Amino acid sequence: MPMQYPTLPIEHLKQDLKKSKYHDNLVFISNEENFEQALKTHKKEELFEDMFGGNFGHCTHYGNLLITENIIPKILKLIRD
């Protein structure tokens, strides 16, 4: 289950993994939308400890919480289906 960096489009990751023999069996998870929404009401420093990637970095506790809240429903759906 590949997950893209929080502020980057999932299409970049899909393209990078397109030639992988596992591509058709992968479930891609985007955090772009939930981080875009959070950045409307929170400072970057509240989501990222640093900005090593330019427009993203290592997540703070709150940033990791956003990822967790986004990914858990998707994992549960996979388990239930």
Image (cartoon, rainbow, N blue to C red):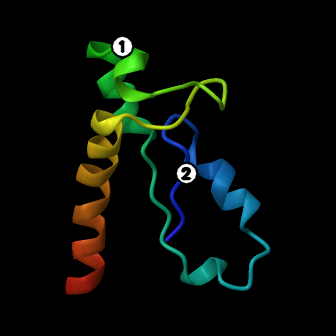
Tell me: residue 43, above or below residue 16: above
Tell me: residue 16, above or below residue 47: below
Q: Secondary structure at mark 2?
A: loop
Visible in this render: residue 70?
yes
Q: Quarter of the image holding residue 29?
A: bottom left
Specify which label sits upstream in the sequence, 1 or 2.
Answer: 2
Return the residue found at the far right.
19
Q: Where is residue 74 drawn, in percent x and y?
A: 29, 66
Residue at 58%, 38% (x, y): give it. Answer: 8
Residue 18 is labelled as none
Q: Secondary structure at mark 1?
A: loop
Q: Where is residue 18 drawn, in percent x and y?
A: 74, 69
Mark 2: which amino acid? Gln
Residue at 30%, 38% (x, y): give it. Answer: 61
**Front residue of this view, candidates 7 and 50:** 50
**Front residue of this view, candidates 59 and 7:** 59
Residue at 54%, 76% (x, y): give it. Answer: 26
Q: Where is residue 11 drawn, in percent x and y?
A: 62, 50
Q: Where is residue 58 drawn, in percent x and y?
A: 51, 37
Residue at 24%, 75% (x, y): give it. Answer: 77
- What residue is shown with label 1? 43
Number of marks drawn: 2
Mark 1: which amino acid? Lys
Q: Residues under labels 1 and 2: Cα distance?
A: 21 Å
- What residue is shown with label 2? 4
Crowd rating for badge 1 (residues with CA inside 10 Å; few <14, some 14–19, many 20+): few
